Image: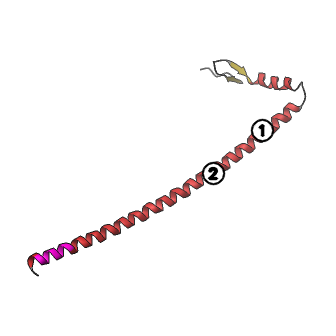
Amino acid sequence: MIELENNEHLAGGSVRSWETEEEEEEEGDNGKSGSSDTKVHRLEKNRESARESRKRKKNYIQTLEQTAEKLQQEVDDLKRGMEVAREKEKMAYLSHLDSVDQLLHGR
């Protein structure tokens, strides 16, 4: 696709100039300076919206990171608990084998 300078591609393959949009906005205000005020207001609202969006995203990411940290801590605790349980089970099994060995050999 060929990129045209100062043009926007619309659905259906048609091309509309940015300059045409600006001219239409100016015509809609009958040549009044309200167009620039509207544009400035729209830009300010857009900036504020973007700022709020970034803030929400930052909070969301911080929440995810905190949750991930808590979950990792829980995984680590569970792994330690499993190791302790395995060690206890191993000791109990060895103790049981020792008892069976004593019974069999009469010690």
User: Is the Cβ of the residue at disc 2 closer than 8 Å to that at disc 1?
Assistant: no
Graded by Cα atoms within 10 Å as few (under 14), some (14 to 19) or many (20 or more), the crowding at tag 1 reads few
- Mark 2–mark 1 distance (CA, rounded to whole Å): 22 Å
**Is residue 99 found left or right of 17 in the rendered image?**
left
Question: Which residue lies at the image location 39% right of the left edge and 63% below the top edge?
Answer: 79
Q: Is disc 2 placed on a helix, strand or loop?
A: helix
Span of residues in magenta:
96-103
The residue under label 2 is: 58
Tell me the chief SS of the magenta region.
Answer: helix
Quadrant (top left, top right, bottom left, bottom right) of the N terminus:
top right
Measuring from the top left, give residue 101's x and y in whole percent: 13, 75
Residue 74's mark? none
Q: To which residue does mark 1 refer?
A: 43
Say which residue appears at 12% left-offset and 77% top-offset. Answer: 103
Q: Nearer the viewer, residue 5 or 25?
A: 25
Location of residue 105 in the rendering, given as x and y in whole percent from the top left corner = 9, 77
Q: Is residue 98 rendered to the left or right of residue 14?
A: left
Q: What residue type is labelled 1?
A: Leu
Based on the displayed image, in which of its 4 quarters is residue 96 positioned?
bottom left
